[in-house]
Image (cartoon, helix red, strand yellow):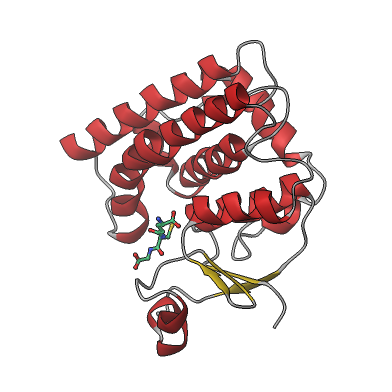
Amino acid sequence: MEPTIYTISGSPRGWRVLLGMVIKGLDMKVKYLSLSDGEHKSDMYLEINPRGRVPSLVAGDVVITDSLAILAWFDRQFPERPLFGTNPEEHARIWSATRDTTDKLRDGMNGLLLPIFFKGADTLTPELREAADTVMYELQWLENRLDGQRYMAGDNPSAADAVSYPEVRILARALETHSELMTELGFADLDQKFPMGHAWARRIEALEGFEKSLPVHWDN
Ligand SMILES: N[C@@H](CCC(=O)N[C@@H](CS)C(=O)NCC(=O)O)C(=O)O
């Protein structure tokens, strides 16, 4: 079987892998599982990933069930256009920026968007406000990172961009789909609040093949 990525359309962790492929110029089969039909909990998929989570990669006998591990495997398997840098310092810088996003920003995003996207939250609560404050604080970190460099960890796109872009774009998507609440939470005019982040997102979107990474259920 040809190497296959399993993901769910719009899954931020799955999107990391798709963007990793864009940055490296890789083309692999992508199989989208239906969240609403619970395909990620089907017997077929649980055989691949017993946790029933996405993304997963299957390439021959190789099965990898974690987004960062898949990005790391890409780099070892296909060394061109490295996602994790070319020297020890760059490697560490990329990991540091990557972990900031995968831990801190992702935590805030979960607190903010799981209630809004999946639990019908439509009024401002102290919990949402706290999550929004965390997200805003972490966005400022991303903005600061971009001072003097084109991408999150230097002048080339890396794993740090592959993990950060989906968070920023999904936030913008929430503003499009839940504009009243998201505006109340302070997320209108993100491009003016974070101008370097705005320019960086356009830079990512200009990467060749970027559109193939977009969630297939969005009207792009
Ligand atoms: N450590 C894993 C976490 C994967 C994960 O939590 N994926 C989410 C989607 S972004 C998922 O599959 N959620 C469905 C579930 O937990 O049932 C990774 O980064 O790949």
Residue 175 lies, in percent from the top left, at 48, 41
At x 25% / y 39%, what residue is drawn? 128
Q: Does residue 55 appear in the picture of this structure?
A: yes
Front residue of 139/174: it is: 139
Residue 91 lies, in percent from the top left, at 59, 30
Q: Quadrant of ligand 1?
A: bottom left
Q: Image height check: is 189 above or below 176?
A: above
Q: Quadrant of the C terminus?
A: bottom right
Residue 201 lies, in percent from the top left, at 65, 33
Position of 80 with respect to 90 (left or right) is: right
Picture quadrant where residue 27 is located? bottom right
Q: Image height check: is 194 above or below 209?
A: above
Picture quadrant where residue 156 is located? top right
Q: How many marks?
A: 0
Q: Does residue 125 appear in the picture of this structure?
A: no
Position of 103 with respect to 174 (left or right) is: left
Front residue of 40/219: it is: 40
Query: Residue reaching furthest right?
Result: 208
Q: Quadrant of the N terminus?
A: bottom right
Position of 153 with respect to 122 (left or right) is: right
At x 68% / y 72%, what residue is drawn? 3
Query: Residue reaching furthest bottom?
Result: 43
Front residue of 49/213: it is: 49
Residue 186 lies, in percent from the top left, at 38, 27
Picture quadrant where residue 134 is located? top left
Q: Image height check: is 39 above or below 201?
A: below
Front residue of 203/154: it is: 154
Query: Residue reaching furthest left?
Result: 126
At x 43% / y 83%, what residue is drawn? 47
